[in-house]
Amino acid sequence: MARLRDDLDREWQDLANRPVATAAIRRWSAADHRLAAFADIQQMLAFVYRPPCPRAGNDVLSALLRLAGEDAFARRCVLEALMPGLVRFTWRYPTCGEDADDRLQNVLVLAVERIGQLAGEEVPWPAATIAGYVRNRLRRAQRARRETTLIPLEAARAIPAAPDRTAAEYLTGILIDGVQRGSLRHSEAALLYTTRVAGHPTASIAATVGVDAVALRTRRLRAEQRLIGQSMSVC
């Protein structure tokens, strides 16, 4: 998580120091009186992180979320304001990803999804509303993971490959070799086999396992990039 979190922090610091951030706070101050007291983005976020009372912090987030319907920077600001709580979810639900960075990515995907759904609305308690959505999705995924998992590599090999997968045996050998060498996780090899050889869509696997389809495709891409880095083609 340290790597992804550091990358996000650097990205945010870069955004917050750009003229676009200064222009945004002026625009927001004029559009909603709840944001008029802040001189810059960082001051506003510091207030949200340590408000004099919960209501005051949520009023700021409510204003931001209302403006976020037509303002992508406002949506990004809402996400940054919720970041400390979202990071804590990665500790409480360790089954939501294979490693710390993967867990944080999955949590952020869910948060961004909910922010997008609520953007433009007046939500009285946005922090609780967004966090509750993410928590419920993580709980469902945790329950689903107890009941099922990705098809194990050995079992997946028994699934008939799609007729047009002429390189199926070659790719299977690459995956097994990667697992044996320790350059590929067993779960990654199973994911690649299940989707690339057996031809099962990532969307259906994601629904079965209870994870976000975009996050699952990203996980697969990382595994493929690792194989490509070893001069192994998975196409």
Image: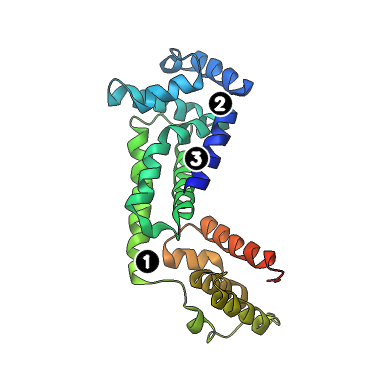
**Location of mark 3 (residue):** 116
Residue ID for mark 1: 145
Question: Which residue is rendered at x = 50% and y = 22% of the image?
Answer: 41
Q: In the image, 131: left or right of 173? A: left
Labels 1 and 3 touching (C-beta < 8 A) = no
Label of residue 132 in the image: none
Callout 1: few (<14), some (14-19), or many (20+) C-alpha neighbours within 10 Å?
some
Q: Amino acid at mark 2?
A: Ala
Q: Mark 2, mark 3: which one is toward the viewer?
A: 2
Amino acid of disc 3: Gly
Question: Is residue 59 shown left or right of residue 233?
Answer: left
Specify the amino acid type for callout 1: Arg
- The residue to which callout 2 is attached is 16
Q: CA distance from mark 1 to mark 3?
A: 26 Å
For mark 3, does the 10 Å Cα neighbourhood hold few (<14), some (14 to 19), or many (20 or more) residues? Answer: some
Q: Nearer the viewer, mark 1 or mark 3?
A: 1
Q: Is residue 141 left or right of residue 31?
A: left
Earlier in the chain: of badge 2 and badge 3, it is: 2
Q: Residue furthest front?
A: 181
Dot placed on the residue nearer the N-terminal end, 1 or 3: 3
Q: Residue at x 48, y 22 (%)?
A: 42
